[in-house]
Amino acid sequence: MKFQPLGKRVLVEREEETKTTASGIIIPDNASKEKPSSGKIVAVGKECEDVEVGDTVVFAKYAGSEVSIDEKKYLILNLEDVLGKLK
């Protein structure tokens, strides 16, 4: 199924959390309850000029609405909730 956000909205797939630290310590699932606040843009609305599909962005912690499309979870964000792009 294809999804096209309307207006100044983007569809974001959250990045998976790293389950190990840089030194190789494994972090158990119950220790990391917070969802990541960065992800990859999968679709953009027609009014979005600052971002494009494929950009990795950081967004506000409690922003957006979660949706399931084809049994996969995504986040619909207003463009103003995107804080910046990672390069």
Image (tube, grey):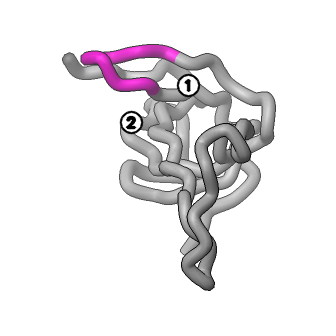
- Residue at point 36% right, 22% down? 4
45 w.r.t. 55: above or below? above
Q: Residue at the far bottom: name it.
A: 23
Report whether 82 appears left or right of 68: right
Instruction: State yes or no: discs 1 and 2 in contact (Cβ < 8 Å).
Output: no
SS under mark 1: strand
Question: What amino acid is labelled 2 in the image?
Answer: Ala
- Residue at point 60% right, 81% down? 22
Q: Is residue 71 magenta?
A: yes
75 w.r.t. 69: above or below? below
29 w.r.t. 57: above or below? above
Question: What amino acid is labelled 1 in the image?
Answer: Ile
- Residue at point 70% right, 58% down? 84
State which region is magenta: 67-73
On the image, the x and y values in percent for residue 13 come to: 45, 39
Give me the disc on residue 76.
Answer: 1
Q: Quadrant of the N terminus?
A: top left
Report the predominant secondary structure element of the magenta stretch.
strand
For marks 1 and 2, the one nearer the N-term is 2
Q: How many numbered marks, from 0 up?
A: 2
- Residue at point 49% right, 49% down? 16
41 and 30: which is toward the camera: 30
Q: Quadrant of the C terminus?
A: bottom right
Report whether 31 appears left or right of 50: right
Give me the disc on residue 43.
Answer: 2
52 and 49: which is toward the camera: 52
On the image, the x and y values in percent for residue 69 come to: 33, 17
Q: Residue at the far left: name it.
A: 1
On the image, the x and y values in percent for residue 10 come to: 52, 33
SS under mark 2: strand
Report whether 65 appears left or right of 33: left
